[in-house]
C-alpha cells in the first residue's frame, strides 16, 4: 500500500479540481442570489418611489381642481391662459355661445353644470378621483345641483395644465 494512502496526503489532482469547480459553482450561485436579492430590493424601492410620486401627484391635482372650482378660478381668463393648454383654450373658445367682441372669449361655464338657476346653496367640490392616463373625475355641487365632469390634467414643465374636459349631465 502506498504511503499517501496510509497517511492521507489529501485529494488527488482530479479530486481537487472537482472540488474547486464545485466551490466556484456554489459561489456563483450565491452571487446570483445576492444579485437577485439586490435587484428585487431595487425594484421594491423603485415601485415605492413610483407609488409615492403617484400619490403626491394625485394629491397635487386634487388640490388644484378643488382650488380651481371652489374659488371660481375657472372664470379668470388669466388663470385659464396660465393653466390650460392651447387645445383646451380652443375648446373653451369654440363653445362660447355669445357675440365675442374682444376675440378672446371662453365658455367658462363648461366647468360647471348646465343649471342656470337654483337654490342659494354653496358651490363646491364633493370629490376628485383619479381615473388613469391623467384623467380625473370631479364631482361637485353647483347651486344645489350635483354634477360631474372628467378633466385631463397634464404636467407641462412642472406646471399643471388642463388639457381636456368631458362634461356629464347634472344629477339631482
Image (cartoon, helix red, strand yellow):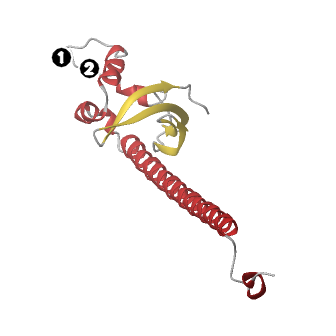
Which of 27/35 is in front?
A: 27
- Report the residue marked by disc 2: 105
Left or right: 108, with 76 as reference point: right
Q: Residue at x 46, y 45 (%)?
A: 122
Where is residue 43 drawn, in percent x and y? 53, 54
Numbered tag placed on residue 74 in the rendering: none
Q: Residues within 10 Å of mark 1 (few under 14, many from 20)?
A: few
Residue 130 visible (yes or no): yes
Locate residue 36: give its quadrant: bottom right
Q: Taking 33 as reference, is 96 left or right? A: left
- Position of residue 130 measured from the top left corner of the image (x, y, whole percent): 53, 41
Using the image, determine if residue 28 lies above or below residue 1: above
Instruction: Compare residues 113 and 164 and report the one nearer the observer.
Output: 164
Q: Tell me the quadrant of the picture where the C terminus can be found.
A: top right
Q: Seen from this angle, which residue lies furthest front?
A: 1
Q: Is residue 128 left or right of residue 98?
A: right
Residue 97, placed above or below residue 56: above
Whole-Å distance between the Cαs marked 1 and 2?
Answer: 7 Å
Residue marked by disc 1: 102
Q: Secondary structure at mark 1?
A: loop
Q: Are marks 1 and 2 in contact (CB under 8 Å)?
A: yes
Amino acid at each position: 500500500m502506498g504511503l499517501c494512502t496510509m497517511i492521507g496526503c489529501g485529494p488527488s489532482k482530479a479530486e481537487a479540481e472537482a472540488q474547486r469547480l464545485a466551490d466556484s459553482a456554489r459561489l456563483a450561485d450565491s452571487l446570483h442570489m445576492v444579485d437577485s436579492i439586490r435587484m428585487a430590493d431595487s425594484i421594491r424601492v423603485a415601485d415605492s418611489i413610483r407609488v409615492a410620486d403617484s400619490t403626491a401627484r394625485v394629491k397635487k391635482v386634487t388640490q388644484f381642481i378643488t382650488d380651481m372650482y371652489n374659488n371660481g378660478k375657472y372664470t379668470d381668463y388669466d388663470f385659464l391662459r396660465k393653466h390650460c393648454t392651447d387645445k383646451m383654450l380652443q375648446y373653451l373658445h369654440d363653445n362660447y355661445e355669445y357675440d365675442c367682441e374682444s376675440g378672446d372669449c371662453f365658455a367658462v361655464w363648461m366647468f360647471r353644470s348646465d343649471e342656470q338657476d337654483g337654490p342659494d346653496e354653496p358651490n363646491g367640490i364633493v370629490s376628485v378621483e383619479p381615473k388613469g392616463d391623467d384623467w380625473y373625475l370631479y364631482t361637485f355641487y353647483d347651486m344645489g345641483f350635483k354634477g360631474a365632469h372628467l378633466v385631463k390634467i397634464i404636467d407641462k414643465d412642472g406646471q399643471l395644465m388642463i388639457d381636456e374636459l368631458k362634461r356629464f349631465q347634472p344629477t339631482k
